[in-house]
Amino acid sequence: MSYLLLIVGLALLIKGADYFVEGASSIARSLNVSPLLIGLTIVAFGTSSPEATVSIIAALEGNAGVALGNVVGSNIFNITLVVGITALLNPLKVESETIRKEIPYTLLASTVLFVLISDMTLQSLNENFITRSDGFILLLFFAIFLYYILEVARHSRDQVKQETADSSPVSSRTKNILFTIGGLAAIIFGGDIVVDHATKIAFSFGMSETLVGLTIVAIGTSLPELITSITAAIKKESEIALGNIVGSNIFNILFVLGSASVVSPLAVDGKIFIDVFLMIIITVILLVFSRTGFRIGKREGVFLIIAYIVYMAYIIMRN
């Protein structure tokens, strides 16, 4: 029964995120909000809403390993498998702003996380924790990122010819609002089911909470990013595909872990240090790939996919 409910929970997360992004994007467009702002916020943050829900619920229920493992596992999944598959479908064009600011900010967020979880090394404490004060630090970095994208969106809006005033019928706007609220409700409910039953399955197999967070939960909650980026790649909108991944990873570390640790301080499993370090390394690799010709091609895509397969084999054997 736990397997069936886990599948139901993941389905609710994925479909809920789909409706949430669709509804919120339509509302934003009807209000003449800049498309860049929609891409950097609603699309990236909307597809990351399953990670946010799962990690915050896991923190509330005392499953720190699931909360932290979910975020780190999702980010590794995004950079390797999602970027790899989308690059195979259609080479990803990388904007100069993404190379100069957004990917480096992802790297900064990952490094800050590594420092914050190193309490035993840096402060000679008995245990490693992401404390409430650490959570507020992460949320402060997230506020700085929000300010940055709002400034980018404001400048973009000045350059983009705005459409005429919204003339969409009330019924259409009502439907979009219902889609947004219904999608968010499905995400929250699905997230609760996933945390409960993924943890039960992990215990039945003798798996640690961190491992189930890095694998089952991380992959399940990252499916919206995968679907969104593949769709963007097929439509040859590669900037959206890569922007979605970069924005999602920043959101996951700074907002999701920041909020989760403010709700309840997170104990850090010693094994997660290797995963966080690997997340930093593959972010550097993504930056290097992006700087070579301002594109991520099929060769780079194959490398990233192989990297994820090797990583999965490693963490399963490590358990």
Image: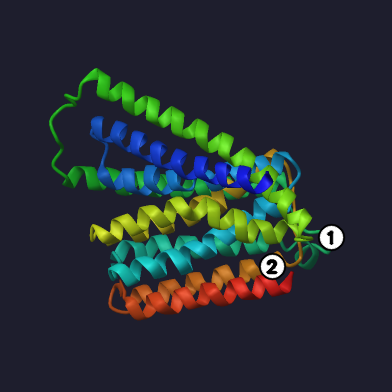
Q: Position of residue 73 (x, y in %)?
A: 59, 61
Determine whether the residue tagged by mark 2 lies in a helix, strand or loop: helix
**Most foreground residue, 250 or 112:** 250
Q: Amino acid at mark 1?
A: Leu
Determine whether the residue tagged by mark 1 lies in a helix, strand or loop: loop
Could you tell me which residue is drawn at 57 percent across and 77 percent down? 310
Q: Which residue is mark 2?
A: 273
Q: Position of residue 206 (x, y in %)?
A: 79, 60
Above/below status of 25 relative to 201: above
User: Could you tell whether 72 is left or right of 17 in the image?
Assistant: right
Residue 136 visible in this rendered orientation of the protein: no
Could you tell me which residue is drawn at 39 percent across and 74 percent down? 301
User: Could you tell whether 54 is left or right of 163 in the image?
Assistant: right
Alpha-carbon span between mark 1 and mark 2 = 16 Å
Q: Toward which corner of the image does residue 229 lie, by quadrant?
A: bottom left
Q: Toward which corner of the image does residue 241 lie, by quadrant?
A: bottom left
Q: Which residue is mark 1?
A: 125
Q: Which residue in the rendered view is the most extreme toward the top?
A: 170
Q: Position of residue 185 (x, y in %)?
A: 51, 31
